[in-house]
Image (spheres, rainbow, N blue to C red):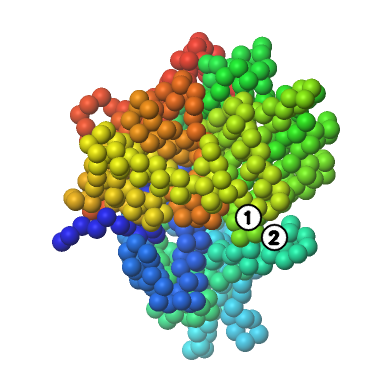
Amino acid sequence: MKLTCYDNRELSWLKFNQRVLEEARDSENPLCECLSFLSIFQNNLDEFFMVRCGSLYDQMLENPDARDNKTNMTCKEQLMAIHARVRELLREKDDTYVQLRAELSMQGMDLVDFHTITTDEADWLEAYFKSEIEPLLSPQIIGKKQPFPFLQNKEIYAVVLLEKKGAEKLGIVPCSSSVFPKLVSLPTGMNRFILTEELILHFASDIFSHHTIKSKSLIRIVRNADIDPDEHREDGDYRKTMEQLICKRRKLCPIKMEFSRLMDTAVIQALCSYLNLTEQQVFYSEAPLNLSMLSAVRDMLRRKKCLFYRRRVPQNPSWYDPSKRVMELVEQQDRFLAFPYESIRPFLTLLNEAGKDPQVVSIKMTLYRVASNSKIVEALMEAAENGKDVVVLVELRARFDEENNIEWSRQLEDAGCRIIYGLDHMKVHSKLCLITKKVANEISYITQVGTGNYNEKTSAIYTDYSLMTANHEIGIEVNRVFHALCLGQTVEQTNHLLVAPHCMQNKIAEIIDAQTALANSGQPAYIGVKINSLTDKYLIEKLIAASKAGVKIEMIIRGISCLIAGVPGETENITIRSIVGRYLEHTRIFIFGTKVDCKIYIASADWMTRNTLRRVEVAVPIYDPAIRERILSMFDVMMADNVKARVQQPDGTYRQQTDDVPKCNAQEYFYEQAYLQADLPETEKAAAPKE
C-alpha cells in the first residue's frame, strides 16, 4: 500500500493526546506526576470534543459535502474515525487508572468502592450518606410534570431506571456540588477514600425508595463550546457582548456522553433522545468520569517527595545583574530569556522600571492569557497611574479565558490605561511589548517579543522564549504593528518582522523556496522548525517540494502534524519528532539555512492557517550572535532528546527513541544548565523563592 504524506488534523491531535497518556503510564515518572498526566489527558480530550468535534458537527450540518483539504475526509467520516479512536484511547485510560490505583494502594492510599469495603465501613457510609449527603440532594423523576433537566457541562449525574406498577421511568440525581467533597474519607482505615458520586449511586434505592431500580449508572456530558464571537459582534459594549456569549456557550448542545455502568440499551437510547445525541456519541468508561479528584490525591501525598518531580526553580539568567537597571542592560545588548529554566523576573523588572522612568512616554502591550493575579497587569496599571500613556490590546476571544480577560480589561481601564479589543474577525495572538522613550528630540524603543503569554504562572511550566532588544528598526516595525491595531488595521509590509496575516506565510514560503533553490543547485540547504502544530497546507506543500529537492528538514512538533515525514520519494528528507515531558513545549523557532549564515526567528505563531492567515502573529529575527548560537544549540539538544521525544514514522505513528547513546532529556538538561549559569550553591538553589 502506498504511504501518504498527509494526516488528518483531528486524528493527528489524538496521537498527541496518546503521547500524553503514555507519560501517565511511564514508570520512569513519579507516581503523582503520572496522576497529573492522566488528568491532563482527560482535560485535553474534553476540550477537543468541546471545540474541534463541536466545530465538525456544525460544519456537517451546514455543508455535509465539505472535505478536509489534506485527506479528503468528510466531516462525518472524520467524526466516525474520531469516535472509533477515542474508544480505543478510553480503554487505555481505564487500564492506566487501574495500574495507578494499584500503585497508590502500595503507597498506603486506597480508592475503594462498595466491593472492597468492610462491613463496618459500609455501615458508616450509610450513616454518613443519610446525615451529610441525602439532605442536600435534588433528585428528579422524569415525567410530564418534571421534564428532562438541563445537565451542566462536565458535571456528574446518577441516572437510574425505575419501575413502579409495571411502568418504567428515569430518575436523575446531580452528584456534583461545591458542598460535597470529591472524596469521602473512611474512618476505619488510614487513607481509604470513596468517590462521592459512587456513594450517591449506591444509595439510589434509598433516594427512590418507592420504586424498584432496574439499572443505574453515572453519566457525564460534554457540551459544544464552538462559538464564534465575531458572528455576534455588534456596535456597542464589546465586553457585554462577550459576557452574553459566555453564558450562551454554557447552554450549547451536548456533543458527547460518558457512562460508568452498563445500562439497558433502552436507557441509553432514551438519554440520547433527551440530549439529542446519537449512540456513536456515547462512550463507556470504567475509570471515574471526572479525574479532577486526582489533584486532591496528589495534595494528600505532597509530603512524599519521591512521588513528585524534583523541585525546580526558575533561575536568573547569567546576564542579569540586580545592581543594574534592566533597561540599561537591554540598551547595551539584546537580552534573552528561556522559560521555565530562567525567571520572568527580569522582564517584570523592565516593566516596573519603564513605569517609573521619566524618559518613558508610553508602554504598549498585547495581552492574550494572563495569570489570575497578574504582576504584569499590576505593572501596567501602575505605569498608567504614573502618567505614562499605556495602551493595552486585550484579546477577549482567548478561548476559555474570556472572563479573566474581561475583568482585567475593566481594571486596566479604571487605572487609566487605553484598552482596545483587537480586530473584527481576527484574533491578535502576537506577544508584543513596546516601551517608547524620548530624550530631547530623540525617540528610542525597547521591544520585547515572545513566543508565549505574559503569564507568570505558565512561564514556570511552559517552555517559551522572550527577546528584549533596543534595535531601533525592530522598534519602528513593532510601533507600526501597534499603530495599525489601534486603527483596526493590519500591517501590509515589513522588512525585519514576519507579521501575519499579510507578511508571514508568504515570506516563510519565499525563504523555503530559497533553500529549495540552493539544494537544486547542489549547495547545502537546511530548514529547522519547532512549533506546536503544522496544518497549513500551502507551507506543507513547500516543505514537500524542499524535501524532494534534497533540503534537510528537521522539525520538532509537539502536537498536530498534518505532514508525515519519511515517506519515500516525498518527505524522505524530513524528520518530525514530538517532545512531551514535564513542561509543555511552547517555543516556536524558525531556522532557515546552514549554521554559518542562517536566518533565525522566534515567534508566537504555529504553522497553521489560522495563525498564518487569520490572526495577527509576529516572528522576530534574532540578530545577536550569542543569542543565535544559544538557540541553535538548544535546538540541537532537543533534536538529540531520546528520553521524552517520539519520532514520527512513515506510517504516521510515533515511537520513542531507542538509541543506545547516552540518555538526553532536553528539559532536564536545560534546567541543569540554568542552575550552573546562575552559579548558586546547591543550598541556595533549593531555597530560591518561587515565582
Which quarter shows the N terminus?
bottom left
Distance (Cα) linking label 1 and label 2: 8 Å
What is the quadrant of residue 456 in the picture? top right
Give, as a three-letter code, the residue at label 2. Met
Which quarter shows the C terminus?
top right
Give, as a three-letter code, the residue at label 1. Arg
Residue at 33 percent across and 53 percent down: it is 541
Residue 52, given in percent of the width and then of the height, sits at 47, 62
Q: Secondary structure at mark 2?
A: helix
Above or below, 191 relative to 173: above
Give the numbered dot on residue 22: none
Residue at 82 percent across and 41 percent down: it is 416
Depth order, front residue of 668/368? 368
Depth order, front residue of 512/270? 512
Residue 524, given in percent of the width and then of the height, sits at 27, 33
Residue 652, given in percent of the width and then of the height, sits at 27, 52
Q: Residues within 10 Å of mark 2 (few under 14, many from 20)?
A: many
Residue 516, given in percent of the width and then of the height, sits at 30, 43
Of marks 1 and 2, which one's residue comes earlier in the chain? Answer: 2
Q: Secondary structure at mark 1?
A: loop
Q: Are marks 1 and 2 in contact (CB under 8 Å)?
A: yes
Identify the residue under disc 1: 397
Residue at 29 percent across and 38 percent down: it is 518
Give the numbered dot on residue 242: 2
Q: Along the horizontal axis of the image, is 148 left or right of 83? A: right
